[in-house]
Image (cartoon, helix red, strand yellow):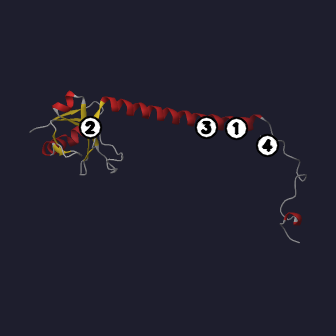
Amino acid sequence: MSVQVTYDADCDQNFRRLYHNQFQQWVNANHRFTIHDGTIVDFDQAHVLNGLHPTKSTHDPNPAPHVTVRLSTPSLRSQRMWYILHWRVSDGSVLLPQPDNEESNRRRQMRRREKKQRRQERDRNIRESREGISAEGRSSGAGDSSRGPVPPRGTGPPRGNDPTRGGGHT
């Protein structure tokens, strides 16, 4: 059985040029997978989503670069579902254990966007507070600080060799 391989617009030409034949041979030789519940799935379509990139996840802790591939069957496509494969050029390809679909992708992307917005807002607040502190220091004049006026030299509390404060020589 020959698996139909397609490429997403996000898959770079370099990957297609260098690894198309190798991936086509691999997926044709490895199109049958036993999934987590013992069911054997015989995939007939592979859609390569992106170029080689490193990531780690709970199901695939290997940081070696891989491409993300959607594997599907007619039955899965009728339900708008697929399995995700992390394919590696050398070895160590991993089929993620749970089927995926548009809704779970949408929720995952929304969570990522919200997390990114929260991080950007936090970073913006930190940056603004730092800029505000440094602007206060520049505009408040010499000798002024947020802790109040600086006393003239020699009029502050004793330092160093004061025997009444437990330091220095007797």
- Single out the mark in the foreground, 2 or 4: 2
Amino acid at dot 1: Ile
**Residue indicated by mark 1:** 133
Kind of residue at badge 3: Ile
Q: Quadrant of the C terminus?
A: bottom right
Instruction: Name the residue carrying label 3.
Output: 126
Instruction: Tell us which disc is closer to us: 2 or 3.
Output: 2
Nearer to me, 47 or 90: 47
Q: Considering depth in this image, is 43 or 47 the residue closer to the camera?
A: 43
Determine which quarter of the picture holds residue 103.
Answer: top left
Q: Residue 97 is drawn in which quadrant?
A: top left
The residue carrying pointer 4 sits among few (fewer than 14), some (14 to 19) or many (20 or more) residues within 10 Å by Cα, namely few
Where does the image place residue 83, in percent across and percent down from the top left? 24, 38
Q: Earlier in the sequence, mark 2 or mark 4?
A: 2
Say few, some or many: other residues with alpha carbon within 10 Å of mark 1 (under 14 / 14 to 19 / 20 or more): few
Q: Earlier in the sequence, mark 2 or mark 3?
A: 2
Instruction: Estimate the spatial distance between the alpha carbons at disc 4 and disc 1, rounded to whole Å.
Output: 12 Å
* Mark 4 lies on residue: 147
Dot 2: few (<14), some (14–19), or many (≥20) neighbours within 10 Å? Answer: some
Q: Quadrant of the N terminus?
A: top left
Q: How many dots with numbers?
A: 4
Front of the two marks 1 and 3: 3
